[in-house]
Image (cartoon, helix red, strand yellow):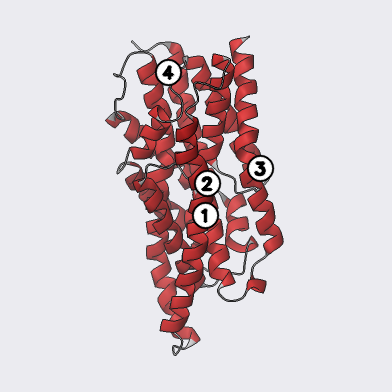
Amino acid sequence: MPNALLIGVVLTALVFEFINGFHDTANAIATTVYTRALTPRVAILASAAMNFLGALTHEGVAMTIAHGLVNVSLDLSVILAALIGAIMWDLLTWWLSIPSSSSHALIGSLIGATIIYTGTTEHVMWDGVLEKVVIPLFTSPLIGLVLGFFLMKVVFELFANWTCHHTTTLFHQLQIVSSLFMAFSHGSNDAQKTMGIITMALIGVGMLPGGAGVPLWAKVFCATTMALGTAIGGRRIMKTVGSGVTRLEPVMGFVSQTSSAIAIQVMTALAAPVSTTQVVTTAVMGSGAAKGFKKVHWGLAKSIVRAWFVTLPATMLLGAAVAFIVLHA
């Protein structure tokens, strides 16, 4: 029978997944809601359904979390400490309406907790961290920015002779499709982080063989929990992403969501756990910049970028602090 600590780790992981759902709901639906393509209620429910489906389709990112970041079997209390550190960061940034990265919060906290547990940095797979975390940290939002900019330019060329009314009507409809694609992509990447943590815990207590994949029940539990979190909604961050970076129109909403989803799908195929928040925000910036660089609120954009650079080191310290307390309690 599973011991109480393992049950606690799984439940805490699901709490993280739930918070991830409502923390990152804005990524998929903010533009749709703020351009009035969908009502918040309909957008949130549709996003929850697509998050669920996306979470069941891949496990490469989960394998990166479970096997590609640390090369030591961690005590359950250390995994629990890493989860608590990530949850604390998520709640803080949610409360402050900062669209930070749940993915990097979990990874940073896991690295910090591992260092405290082992007393050395040698058990962190720094090559894996560089390849799967740090490089995608910069490349994925850059891809979102570039795609948003150039796709917007293409749309301008293709629909230059259309009336404003006709283009608005068309992209109101297309934006619904792009938001579903974005929600699916969000689930296919973000939900896997928690699956990886649960898999790591199960391997650590001998309930799964080393190198094992994600159990089906863990996929279903994580997918369901993320969908429930998404259904609760992330209205605080939705305002920042949806209207704080630039003034959105339906065509920009479609372009930014499509660009984001493509970038996330590329990273998911590479088994890289990326921040959907970062990718969506930069895609919105890119689509806005295509209309003119003065259309983007670069002051707010800079504050968001600063939050990206703070997340990994801050959560490493937070995970280390929680692990120290747990191990010495």
The amino acid at mark 3 is: Trp
**Residue in the image at 62% along x and 66% along y:** 246
55, 124: nearer the viewer: 124
Image side of residue 257 versus residue 95, left or right: left
According to the picture, the residue beneath numbered tag 2 turns out to be 137
From mark 1 to mark 3, how far is it between C-alphas?
A: 23 Å
Discs 1/3, front: 1
How would you rate the neighbour count of disc 2 (Cα within 10 Å): few for under 14, some for 14-19, many for 20 or more?
many
- Looking at the image, tell me whether mark 2 or mark 3 is earlier in sequence order: 3
According to the picture, the residue beneath numbered tag 4 turns out to be 7
How would you rate the neighbour count of disc 1 (Cα within 10 Å): few for under 14, some for 14-19, many for 20 or more?
many
From mark 2 to mark 4, how far is it between C-alphas?
A: 32 Å
Kind of element beneath mark 2: helix
- Looking at the image, tell me whether mark 2 or mark 4 is earlier in sequence order: 4
Q: Residue 12: x, y in percent?
A: 49, 26
Q: Are marks 2 and 1 in contact (CB under 8 Å)?
A: yes
* Quadrant where the image shows the C terminus: top right
From mark 2 to mark 1, how far is it between C-alphas?
A: 7 Å
How would you rate the neighbour count of disc 3 (Cα within 10 Å): few for under 14, some for 14-19, many for 20 or more?
few
- Looking at the image, tell me whether mark 1 or mark 4 is earlier in sequence order: 4
